[in-house]
Amino acid sequence: MKRVRKLIDLDENALSVLEAEAKKQKRSLKSFLEYTIEETARRLESPSEEYTIMMDDMLSRLEKGEVQFNPIEEIEKKYGL
């Protein structure tokens, strides 16, 4: 994977908190920031791997007739909407 360098500006308080967390995890600040940013990007990926797996399972269950649907009126009545 190609790496890209970016210069970022951080608030001193935010930097202090991040440095403390990096030390708790026995990581360098750079390593901690890279890991945190990459993990956040993976979670935000559209669609995520977890979502794709869940939807594939749901579609499979739908094809097998294993999914039941309730009319919207029933849901509204149940929740007082």
Image: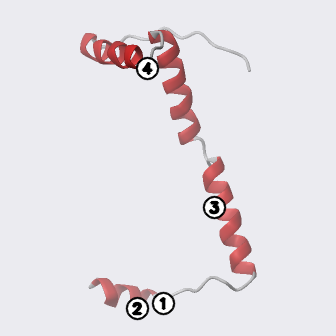
Residue type (three-letter) at the residue carrying disc 2:
Glu
* Residue located beneath label 3 in the image: 54
* Residue located beneath label 2 in the image: 74
Q: For the point 39% across and 13% down, which residue is it? A: 23
* Residue located beneath label 4 in the image: 25
Q: Report the front residue among 25 and 13.
A: 25
Give me the C-alpha separation between circle 4 and circle 3: 32 Å
Q: Position of residue 49 (x, y in %)?
A: 66, 48
Give me the C-alpha separation between circle 1 and circle 2: 5 Å
Mark 1 or mark 4: name the one nearer the start of the chain: 4
* SS category of the residue bearing label 2: helix
Q: Report the front residue among 28 and 26.
A: 26
Mark 4 or mark 3: name the one nearer the start of the chain: 4
Q: Nearer the viewer, mark 4 or mark 3?
A: 4
Mark 3 or mark 2: name the one nearer the start of the chain: 3
Mark 1 or mark 3: name the one nearer the start of the chain: 3
Picture layout, residue 65 above or below residue 33? below
Q: Position of residue 79 (x, y in %)?
A: 30, 83
Give me the C-alpha separation between circle 1 and circle 4: 49 Å
Residue type (three-letter) at the residue carrying disc 1:
Pro
* SS category of the residue bearing label 4: loop
* Residue located beneath label 1 in the image: 71
